[in-house]
Amino acid sequence: MKAEESSGLDSSLQNPQTVITMRDVTKVYAMGQESVHALRGISFDICQGEFVSIMGPSGSGKSTCMNMIGCLDRPSSGLVAIGGKETARMNEKELALLRNQTVGFVFQQYHLLPAMTVLENVMLPLRYQGIERADRRAMAEAALERVGLENRMKHLPNELSGGQKQRVAIARATVTRPSIILADEPTGALDSSTGRAVLELFGEINASGTTIVIVTHDPKIGASTRRCIRILDGLIQSDTMNEGGLHA
């Protein structure tokens, strides 16, 4: 039997609907004389247009899983493929290009550049793609309009509320029209009402066909997504569909 047949990986990698593939992924970190097993062999597929939460407590391995999906780290063993491309086969330049073109990141603490206006922050990823300034501006303005911040484009981040900052971060993540949005505890720094509004915004983005993956410790967020993958001690505890989740 050929290696690719015995691995069972070819069908998911060749399926154009599969945007994230993880197969028997492990990650071991050296901490002095000890080895820390962050992931112990996890496997799942995520298809284009899914709305998924990866949920677990601190130290469960969910952040390591996020780093694998975001091409920020490489597995110790197993396979990670984003858009059908095996990340272990790619060099750092190729990984950076894949991140920039395929994955949009939203973080709990926003990571906005304080000296730049809202518009300039959203334009920044487009600069790395080599897009002309006039086009960058038009695309960034459109992204900010989609999140309801057309009247805040000239403001600095410190002039915004937490919810507005997160909307800027979402506009920045979506301005390149990535196929995947990867959000790390995106409502963790927000009050409950603002957090719900941000989740509804993710739902609207997902409804347009973008794959949304939210990494969280919060069971309420886990229950709000269409699918929830629960991780504990580096292993998948469960992978379930939620009847009342946002979008299929």
Image (cartoon, rainbow, N blue to C red):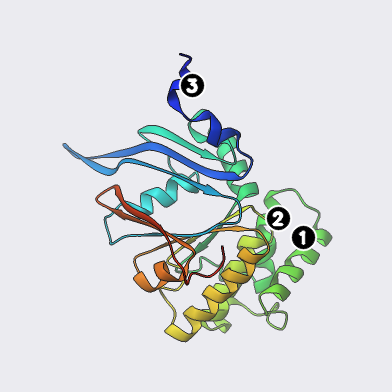
Residue position marked by numbered label 3 in the rendering:
5
Q: Earlier in the sequence, mark 3 or mark 1?
A: 3
- The residue type indicated by label 1 comes to Arg
Residue at point 65% right, 56% down?
A: 125
Mark whose residue sits in front, 3 or 1: 3
- Are the residues at dot 2 and dot 3 in contact (C-beta closer than 8 Å)? no
Left or right for 132, reference 87: right
Q: Position of residue 240 (x, y in %)?
A: 40, 58
- The residue type indicated by label 3 comes to Glu
Q: Tag 2, which secondary structure?
A: helix
Of all residues shown, which one is farthest toward the bottom?
A: 193
Q: Earlier in the sequence, mark 2 or mark 3?
A: 3
Q: Earlier in the sequence, mark 2 or mark 1?
A: 2
- Cα separation, mark 3 vs mark 1, equals 45 Å
Residue position marked by numbered label 2 in the rendering:
126
Of all residues shown, which one is farthest toward the top?
A: 1
Q: Tag 3, which secondary structure?
A: helix
Residue position marked by numbered label 1 in the rendering:
136
Q: Is residue 129 above or below residue 177?
A: above
Left or right for 141, reference 207: right
Query: Few, some or many C-alpha atoms within 10 Å of disc 3 (few <14, some 14-19, many ≥20)?
Result: few
- The residue type indicated by label 2 comes to Leu
Q: Is residue 90 visible?
A: no
Image quadrant assignment for residue 57: bottom left
Q: Which mark is residue 86?
A: none
- Cα separation, mark 2 vs mark 3, equals 40 Å
Q: Position of residue 63 (x, y in %)?
A: 37, 54
Query: Few, some or many C-alpha atoms within 10 Å of disc 2 (few <14, some 14-19, many ≥20)?
Result: many
Q: Tag 1, which secondary structure?
A: helix
Residues 205 and 153: in front is 205
Which quadrant of the figure contains the C terminus?
bottom right
Image quadrant assignment for residue 96: top right
